[in-house]
């Protein structure tokens, strides 16, 4: 089993560029695959999760070439051009891949079966199956979990769906199915979630309109191939943003980061905690805003995180919990029950790891209360178990900026699902993280 050994560090320095955005990379393969023509995707994230989507689209008959590093050339087969895969589609560790592919496959005339690794096989799938069945899809889950079986149908019917949970994955699955429906599909969100699907659908020429938490899609139009530039993944940048806040001194720069406002809740939260953050060089990569982010070592204070910011920072909570553990006073996070059904139960797993390092927390059904220790060596060392969750692994790696002894982080192989090269990049800017092990 792979582990990280993170020795105490005090500073990080320099300028880094994180790999491409995972959410956008998945979507570019799916929409490119059902468009007419060739879509070239630059800055494509070559992580295990996105490669699961790539292999699935290929198995469904979409030719995809990789002519250069971080480039995917997708030869779209058109809306009705996908073909039955000869075996189950393995979505690996990726909830996004499985849920969005379920939406894409719900309206096809052929049968499909989707499976995943041991973590994905435990994650809830009825949240996508329920609205898709309302559209006429034939979907079976195993007591709400994968495998997901989709039987071919002739046509779906558009629905008006009020999302019961703020989930971009569910919204996107319904919209992808809506491309194959008779009549309009409308999705209403209880809180704003990432809007990459809506932006990309527009770029591919779909008739989609989004305003004030309601997205409307008209089916029928064929999608036209387009070239895409994938920005750096804000969720990967987040580890270095928090790390730079925790460092003893200095300013750190992250270049070419996607700063779509539906993703950057962490910046608002850290700003309220007193972090010194500046966005410069604003520009756009197609439909997505991009900037460089400068972060200066900061003294953080504990806050109550406003519930409205939770969906906008949903993947950043493991890193934020580490920041809160280094802040003056208490930080309270509530309304974040979705964290319990991510790649691990991120509330329980982070509380367990923080306790190992000597941080007091109170576990709530929907969040965590964290008593911060602002001193330089806030954390002790010890062994923490990531439960196979990539973001837990990276969060404890950056905790080494405030630890007095080595942190042994167990079960880190899944960092490759979202952030290939994390260890090398971390070392290049001053963290003392080493990958160890490899046996079973
Ligand atoms: C994602 C949506 C979020 C997020 C996940 C990626 C997406 O999940 O946690 O990492 O690409 O749509 P939920 O929709 O379940 O909140």
Image (spheres, rainbow, N blue to C red):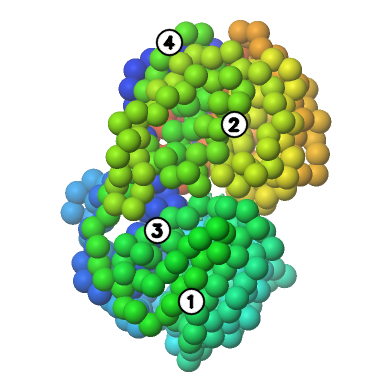
Which circle marks residue 250 in the picture?
Answer: 4
Q: Secondary structure at mark 4?
A: loop
Q: Residues within 10 Å of mark 1 (few under 14, many from 20)?
A: many
Depth check, mark 3 against mark 4: the one in front is: 3
Q: CA distance from mark 2 to mark 3?
A: 25 Å
Which corner quadrant of the image does residue 391 belong to?
top right
Which corner quadrant of the image does residue 144 belong to?
bottom right
- Mark positioned earlier in the residue sequence (2 or 3): 3
- Mark positioned earlier in the residue sequence (1 or 3): 1
- Mark positioned earlier in the residue sequence (4 or 2): 4
The quadrant of the rendering that contains the N terminus is top right
Depth check, mark 4 against mark 2: the one in front is: 2
Mark 3, residue position: 199
Residue occupying the far front of the picture:
212
Residue 33, image x, y percentages: 32, 69
For this rendering, which residue is in front, 137 or 166? 166
Residue 288, image x, y percentages: 36, 49
CB-based contact (under 8 Å), mark 3 and mark 4: no
- Mark positioned earlier in the residue sequence (1 or 4): 1
- Mark positioned earlier in the residue sequence (3 or 4): 3
Q: Secondary structure at mark 2?
A: helix
Q: CA distance from mark 2 to mark 1?
A: 35 Å
Residue 7 seen in this snapshot = no
Mark 2, residue position: 269
Residue ID at (38%, 82%): 220
Mark 1, residue position: 178
The quadrant of the rendering that contains the C terminus is top right
């Amino acid at each position: 089993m792979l582990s990280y050994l993170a020795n105490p560090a005090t500073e990080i320095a320099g300028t880094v560029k994180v790999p491409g955005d995972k959410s956008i990379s998945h979507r570019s393969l799916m929409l490119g695959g059902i468009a007419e023509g060739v879509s070239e995707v630059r800055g494509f994230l070559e992580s295990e999760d996105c490669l699961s989507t790539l292999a699935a689209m290929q198995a469904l008959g979409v030719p995809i070439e990789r002519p250069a590093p971080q480039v995917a050339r997708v030869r779209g087969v058109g809306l009705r051009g996908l073909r039955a895969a000869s075996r189950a589609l393995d979505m690996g560790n990726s909830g996004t891949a499985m849920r969005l592919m379920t939406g894409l496959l719900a309206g096809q005339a052929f049968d499909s079966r989707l499976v995943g690794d041991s973590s994905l096989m435990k994650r809830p799938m009825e949240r996508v199956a329920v609205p898709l069945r309302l559209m006429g899809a034939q979907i079976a889950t195993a007591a709400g979990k994968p495998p997901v079986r989709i039987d071919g149908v002739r046509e779906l019917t558009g629905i008006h769906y009020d999302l019961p949970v703020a989930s971009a994955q569910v919204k996107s699955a319904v919209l992808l199915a809506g491309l194959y429906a008779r009549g309009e599909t409308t999705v209403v969100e209880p809180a704003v979630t990432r809007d990459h699907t809506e932006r990309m659908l527009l770029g591919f020429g779909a008739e989609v309109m989004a305003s004030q938490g309601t997205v409307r899609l008209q089916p029928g139009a064929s999608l036209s191939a387009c070239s895409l530039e994938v920005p750096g993944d804000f969720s990967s940048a987040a580890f270095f943003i928090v790390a730079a806040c925790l460092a003893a001194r200095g300013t750190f720069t992250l270049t070419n980061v996607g700063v779509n406002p539906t993703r950057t809740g962490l910046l608002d939260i850290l700003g309220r905690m007193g972090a010194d953050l500046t966005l410069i060089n604003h520009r756009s990569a197609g439909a997505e805003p991009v900037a460089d982010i400068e972060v200066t070592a900061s003294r953080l204070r504990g806050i109550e995180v406003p519930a409205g910011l939770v969906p906008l920072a949903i993947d950043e909570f493991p890193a934020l919990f580490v920041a809160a553990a280094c802040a003056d006073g208490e930080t309270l996070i509530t309304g974040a029950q979705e964290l319990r059904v991510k790649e691990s139960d991120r509330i329980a797993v982070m509380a367990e790891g923080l306790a190992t390092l000597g941080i007091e927390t109170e576990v709530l059904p929907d969040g965590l209360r964290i008593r911060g220790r602002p001193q330089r060596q806030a954390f002790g060392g010890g062994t923490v178990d990531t439960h196979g969750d990539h973001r837990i692994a990276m969060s404890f790696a950056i905790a080494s900026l405030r630890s007095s002894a080595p942190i042994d982080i167990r079960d880190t192989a899944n960092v490759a699902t979202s952030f290939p090269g994390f260890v090398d990049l971390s070392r290049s800017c001053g963290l003392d993280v080493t990958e160890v092990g490899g046996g079973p």
